[in-house]
Amino acid sequence: MINAMSRPRPLPHDPIAEAHRQWTGHGWGAVADGMAAVTSLVRAQQIVMARVDEALKPSGLTFSRYELLQLLSFSKTGALPMAKASARLQVHPTSVTNTVDRLEAAGLVVRVPHPSDRRATLIEITDAGRTSVAEATAALNAQVFAEPGLPPDRIRALLTLLAEFRHEAGDYEAPDTENLAFHATWQPTGESPRDSLGS
C-alpha cells in the first residue's frame, strides 16, 4: 500500500469528471474524452513525481539527475558522450549540460576528454556518484517502484496502453508492433536491457 504520509487528503469529487461534464455541457462533447485523458495523464504525472521526489529527498537528487547517474552506471565504462546521454534521456542537450554541471559540482560525475574525438566530451560517473545512485535506486525500488499504485495485472495493462501512446506519438520505433509493451521484455540483438540502455 502507498505510504499514507505521501498522500494529500482526497477531494470529495473527481474534478476531472466534473471538467468532462462541463466540456460536454459547453458543446465540446466530441473532445471531452480527449481532454479528460490528457488532464488525467498530467495529474497522474504530478502524483507519481511527488512520490519520486519524496523518495529521492535524502539523496539530494532530482529525478533528472538520478536518471543521468543511472544511465552512466549502466554503461559499460561508466562514461558516455554528452550527445549520446542527451539522446538516451530524450532531453535537450542544454538540459543535460545543466544537469551535468550540478552533478559535477557535487562530485558525482566528471567531464573527461573523449579518447578518439577531440570535439566530444565524456561524462563519467565517480565512485561517489555510484554510491549515491545505488542508495537512491534502493529508495525508489522500495518506496515507489515496488508499489506503483495498481496491482500487477493492471500495471501490465497500463504499460501496454502507454507504450502504444508513446509509439503513436513517435517516441520510439517498435520492433514488434503486436507487442507494444516490448520494453518490458524485449532484448534487441541478444543484448541485455542493461547493455541496450547504457552501452
Image: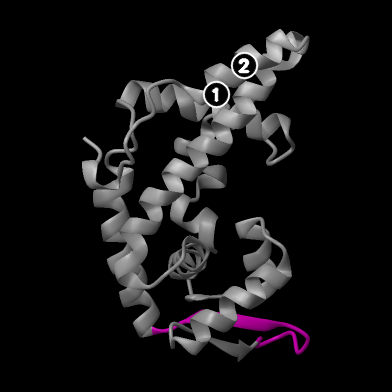
Which residue, given by chain and number where applicable, does mark 2 sit on?
Answer: 20
Q: Residues within 10 Å of mark 2 (few under 14, many from 20)?
A: many
Magenta span: predominant SS is: loop
- Which region of the structure is painted magenta? 114-126
Q: Which residue occupies 48% across, 30% down?
A: 159
SS class, disc 2: helix
Q: Nearer the viewer, residue 188 or 18?
A: 18
Query: Residue at (41%, 50%) from the top-left corner?
Result: 50
Quadrant of the image containing the N terminus: top left
Q: Position of residue 39 (x, y in %)?
A: 60, 30
Is-magenta flag for residue 121? yes
Q: Quadrant of residue 167?
A: top right
Mark 1, residues whose alpha carbon is within 10 Å: few (<14), some, or many (≥20)?
A: some
Is residue 136 visible in the rendered image? The answer is yes
Label tally: 2
Relative image position of residue 18 (x, y in whole percent): 56, 18
In contact (CB < 8 Å): disc 2 and disc 1 = yes
